[in-house]
Amino acid sequence: MDAKIDWHSEAARLILRNKAFIEGKFVDAASGKTFECISPVDGSVLAHVAACDSEDVDRAVKAARGAFEKGVWADQAPKTRKRVLVKFADLIQKNANELALLETLDMGKPIINARQGDLRAVAECVRWYGEAIDKLYDEIAPTPKSALALITREPLGVVGAVVPWNFPLLMAAWKFAPALAAGNSVVLKPAEQSPLSALRIAEIAAEAGIPPGVFNVVPGFGETAGQALGRHMDVDAITFTGSTEVGKLFLKYSGESNMKVVSLECGGKTPNIVFADTPDLDAAARGTADGIFYNSGQVCDAASRLLVEDKIHDAFLSKVAALAKNYAPADPLDEKTQMGAMVDSTQTKRVMNYIAKGQEEGASLMLGGKQVRQETGGFYIEPTIFDAVDNRMTIACEEIFGPVLSTIRFKTAEDAVKLANDSRYGLEANLWTNDLSKAHRIARALRAGTVTVNTRDGGGIEVPFGGYKQSGFGRDKSLHALHKYTQLKTTYINVG
Ligand code: NAP
Ligand code: MG
């Protein structure tokens, strides 16, 4: 990253894209309506953004279908798609400061996280799928000699991607990069809270050589634009990241329309299990604090339930509490800031209600719990730790999506597994122990799409990510993600 950027002056110079991106052009919503895009950094209105509804979604789907039928992208050699995607990744890197700033202004995360975390991962994701696509071979089945059976993967056609606001570009890239690599056309609906970076990246995609109609962005509300995409008769697949509640709606939309393929990356309530034999309790404490306070806890796999073995409970919790001080909310545009703003006032109220509920239900508020920095006009909540939580309490069952840790004690490994699995979610689990066979045994018993051992890091683009149970189905990242954007064709030939 460049040295000493004055992010406040950079912000003042930004030109914001505020229209829908359809068929390679920025256009107003057909209705002419807009919505206010608010910065949670200080509550200011950043832009008035086109509020797309079903008419605009239909325009975007028609453009996407037209491009797919013409084969301007789908019929390009994999090598050609690779070249364009690699150039796209280069341009993302070139514009990374601007894109990172858009993320920070639009959803409040610290600039350092946006620039060094999100943007690096976005460029890497696009490059990885670009690089992968000309290295994949299809199959020939083991048939009798009289036949030749080809098993080939074909793109689906038009993919609708509906994403949340917590990692606006990264969640989008996990969808559009493999979908585009496989030859599909994409219609992306960003979250209403964070549309700006998606609009800018669509323009960058066009500059890289993605043909008009292949990558469209329709900003707008879930109930209008999102639903229109989910119910559209000419959308072949919906790839969704967001809450479990809305994920279930997309299953319904599909069933009530054209039976489009649906894949869902939904909520989580990650258990973070710390055993007394953990080799490095300081590392575990750092992982615990980062696991719940990074991005203000607005992370699907936030380590929101700390399951700690009885005999180290006090010592471990005081380590975590000491580290929590590093996450005092501060100006997101300051490079030293570790914790920024909550995404908006609604999410802030929701989290504050959970904090009140935790106290009502008898959990012990050990640290934080207050809204702060109100004088800025923005939305900030202190790192918050609850102790003496019961796994049946609301704060242990529901996804809070804020910087709120619930601590639960356990005595035996069996209890820990039981508590960990006693959740409707199954996105991720973390565990810390020095005992290798215990680690394997427990990892196998945990019902989660990712289990990390002695680290919070669940791996980069090369490993799959997704949920068990009501955390959804289908996987983002890795070559497995390509299954969501392709279908298998069998061509069975009688060769005599
Ligand atoms: P959300 O409310 O479910 O929204 C997600 C997306 O769905 C947004 O684009 C939203 O549009 C749209 N939407 C909302 N209501 C809709 C409706 N009735 N019909 C169609 N679309 C609709 O989730 P969020 O609050 O943005 O994000 C937080 C959630 O995302 C958490 O549950 C978190 O765990 C989950 N998440 C999961 C993963 C993962 O990989 N598993 C990763 C990140 C986040 P609007 O913004 O306009 O409402
Ligand atoms: Mg915003």
Image: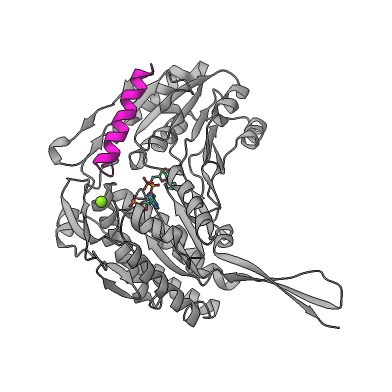
Q: Nearer the viewer, residue 207 or 426?
A: 426
Residue at point 48% right, 57% down? Answer: 239
Q: Position of residue 54 (x, y in %)?
A: 35, 63
Q: Position of residue 278 (x, y in %)?
A: 54, 28
Q: Quadrant of residue 406?
A: top left
From the viewer's perspective, tell me whether residue 74 is left or right of residue 150.
left
Residue at point 27% right, 37% down? Answer: 348
In the rendered picture of this protein, how many numbered marks are placed on residues?
0
Answer whether residue 347 is magenta in the image: yes
Q: How is the image coloured?
A: one colour
Quarter that holds the C terminus: bottom right
Residue at point 35% right, 59% down? Answer: 225
Above or below, 242 relative to 1? above
The magenta region covers 339-365
Above or below, 4 relative to 342? below
Would residue 128 be seen by someone viewing this image from the given angle?
no
From the viewer's perspective, tell me whether residue 108 is left or right of residue 307.
left
